[in-house]
């Protein structure tokens, strides 16, 4: 950070300072000779929120002093904040962009209570991000707009100007204060709508006119019913309804032929998943936390030691996530015990975390964590969907698997899902990015085996047994954030959830088959193709369950 600041001072003695990356796809500055305030690392480590909110100081004397040779360290640190404040201020000024050529505008955290009307004068604008401001309304927007992020603002209704955007594909009003969707119908071009974390109690019938919709996020609201018009969304594949107030699920919802990824936990109609027999809580003082392994928006995963064994610990940041209540993920995860599922060994829940919005923490006495088996050598099978793929996972260009590898992965995941649905559990988010895998040679065996029994409180022997079983698995299903227990729902509705998840499995097989490296006989791939075709049949009632799919995949090798 110190070196970056020094270079910025040495190379940029001019009065005006612009942000790094001031030309390119995101926008072209009018004055290309403006210097950069600092590198990304300087802004990350040195640019505090306090500095960004202060008025920028542009005195020439300060710039000369900072670029002199005898400046004290505290003066450099102070100047770094001022420079970054200038960069943020410049980023938020529409006058600093070339309106004709700019295709993307990043106006997050700019302190806007009103968006400048000049934004309508950007005819090539495709993506606009006005998140985390204090906006209550929006001016007219460019008709070219395809993506609009407005999360974390003060909207109580979606502004009517949004309805006038004929090309809009993706829209997010997550974590605002929405009480309604507004009077004007949303653009029928929408394919991805995010309304998570609001105060919605009802949805208009006009929502059903969005017939191109593929991904609809409605978790963490106060919905007591759903408009039947949603059934007209024939392309809808992913629907998040967790943590609402739905007393029942309408029959038409389960008849939607393309609905594939559903989350409904945390509603009155859905009972919590029953934990495995004798599963007890973990004591925090028994954990020796180590290095951070990964971090997402809702949790941090760290390596740890528990009773002398290596484990992974998932620590939640807040009671809610974009999929619903995190405690529902913990309950679903603790209900499952199978070699092809990343095993939860225990959990810890302290305090109360029933909050309306995911942005709020759980309070000083709140803590939620899970202890997971240590699975060395495993890595994610894929990557999450992109803004262009919407509901389909993405993969690195070099991602390839041999026929035996594909068959081992498919068999293991089919067995895992057979185990889940035998217990009336739906994963809700069956994707390659939620599957861990490793090569058969490293795993030391085949695709997995049958389920195990309930476990008592984690101790040295059970932790070692979990590690031994882990060594026999090629693939493991993980991340139960969207999972739910459907055993308490009406008996006539229960088969629909397995048929729904079968389609997700079939799409997964199609994606993997597209990335076959050519190794292995065509006969080896025949069961994969047969299972993929059967699982993706257009009529849900014609799709096989996971017991039948597992038998199909066991027919070769």
Image (cartoon, grey):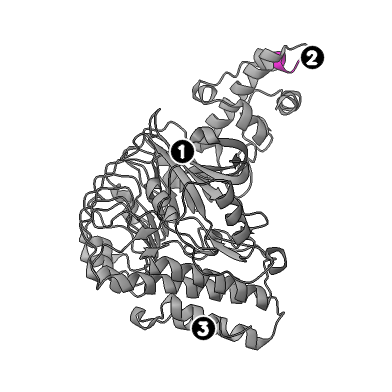
Question: How far is the residue under mark 1 from the one under mark 2?
Answer: 44 Å
**Tag in front: 3 or 2:** 3
Residue 25 in the image, given as x and y percentages of width and height: 60, 50
Question: How far is the residue under mark 3 from the one under mark 2?
Answer: 74 Å
Q: Is residue 151 above or below residue 210?
A: above
First reached walking from the N terminus: tag 1 or tag 2: 2
> Label 2: which residue?
69
Q: Residue furthest right?
A: 69
Residue 125 appears anywhere in the view: no
Secondary structure, mark 2, is: loop
Report the span colored magenta: 64-68
**What is the crowding at mark 2: few (fewer than 14 residues within 10 Å), some, or many (at least 20)?**
few
Secondary structure, mark 1, is: loop
Q: Magenta residues: mostly which secondary structure?
A: helix
Residue 287 in the image, given as x and y percentages of width and height: 55, 37
**Tag in front: 1 or 2:** 1
Task: Answer with left or right where residue 92 lies relative to residue 20.
Answer: left
First reached walking from the N terminus: tag 3 or tag 2: 2
Residue 41 in the image, given as x and y percentages of width and height: 66, 34
Q: Residue furthest bottom?
A: 523
Q: Is residue 164 above or below residue 208?
A: above
> Label 1: which residue?
317
- Do the residues under discs 1 and 3 have CB atoms within 8 angstroms? no
């Amino acid at each position: 950070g110190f070196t970056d600041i020094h270079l910025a001072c040495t190379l940029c003695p001019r009065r005006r300072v612009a942000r790094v990356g001031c030309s390119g796809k995101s926008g072209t500055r009018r004055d290309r000779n403006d210097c950069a305030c600092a590198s990304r690392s300087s802004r990350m480590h040195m640019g505090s929120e306090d500095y960004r909110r202060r008025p920028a100081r542009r005195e020439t004397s300060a710039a000369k002093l900072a670029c002199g040779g005898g400046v004290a360290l505290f003066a450099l640190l102070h100047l770094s904040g001022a420079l970054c404040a200038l960069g943020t201020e410049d980023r938020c000024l529409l006058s600093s962009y070339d309106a004709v050529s700019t295709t993307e505008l990043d106006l997050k955290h700019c302190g806007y209570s009103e968006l400048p009307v000049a934004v309508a004068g950007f005819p090539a604008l495709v993506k606009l991000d006005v998140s985390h401001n204090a906006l209550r309304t929006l001016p007219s927007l460019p008709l070219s707009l395809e993506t609009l992020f407005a999360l974390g603002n003060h909207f109580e209704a979606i502004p009517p100007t949004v309805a006038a955007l004929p090309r809009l594909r993706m829209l997010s009003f997550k974590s605002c204060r929405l009480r309604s969707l507004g009077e004007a119908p949303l653009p029928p071009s929408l394919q991805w709508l995010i309304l998570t974390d609001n105060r919605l109690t009802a949805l208009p019938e006009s929502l059903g006119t969005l017939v191109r919709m593929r991904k609809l996020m409605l978790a963490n609201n106060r919905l007591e019913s759903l408009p039947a018009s949603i059934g007209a969304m024939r392309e809808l594949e992913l629907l998040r309804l967790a943590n609402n107030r739905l007393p029942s699920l309408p029959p038409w919802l389960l008849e939607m032929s393309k609905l594939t990824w559903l989350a409904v936990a945390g509603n009155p109609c859905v009972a919590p998943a029953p934990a495995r027999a004798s599963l007890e809580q973990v004591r925090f003082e028994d954990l020796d936390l180590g290095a951070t392994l990964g971090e997402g928006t809702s949790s941090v995963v760290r390596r740890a030691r528990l009773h002398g064994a290596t484990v992974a610990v998932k620590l939640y940041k807040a009671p809610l996530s974009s999929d619903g209540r995190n405690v529902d993920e913990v309950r679903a995860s603790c209900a499952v015990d199978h070699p092809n599922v990343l095993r939860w060994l225990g959990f810890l829940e302290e305090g109360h975390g029933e909050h309306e919005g995911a942005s709020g923490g759980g309070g000083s006495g709140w803590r939620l964590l899970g202890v997971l088996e240590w699975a060395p050598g495993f890595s994610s099978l894929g990557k999450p969907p992109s803004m262009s793929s919407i509901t389909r996972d993405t993969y690195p260009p070099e991602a390839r698997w041999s026929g035996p590898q594909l068959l081992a992965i498919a068999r293991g995941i089919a067995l895992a899902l057979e185990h889940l649905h035998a217990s009336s559990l739906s994963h809700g988010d069956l994707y390659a990015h939620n599957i861990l895998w490793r090569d058969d040679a490293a795993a030391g065996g085949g695709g997995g085996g049958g389920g195990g029994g309930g476990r008592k409180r984690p101790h040295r022997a059970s932790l070692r047994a979990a590690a031994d079983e882990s060594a026999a698995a090629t693939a493991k299903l993980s991340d139960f954030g969207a999972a739910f227990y459907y055993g308490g729902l009406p008996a006539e509705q229960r088969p629909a959830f397995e048929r729904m998840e079968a389609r997700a499995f079939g799409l997964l097989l199609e994606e993997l088959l597209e990335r076959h490296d050519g190794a292995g006989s065509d006969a080896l791939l025949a069961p994969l193709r047969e299972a993929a075709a059967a699982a993706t049949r257009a009529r849900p009632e014609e799709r096989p369950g996971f017991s039948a799919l597992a038998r199909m995949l066991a027919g070769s090798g």
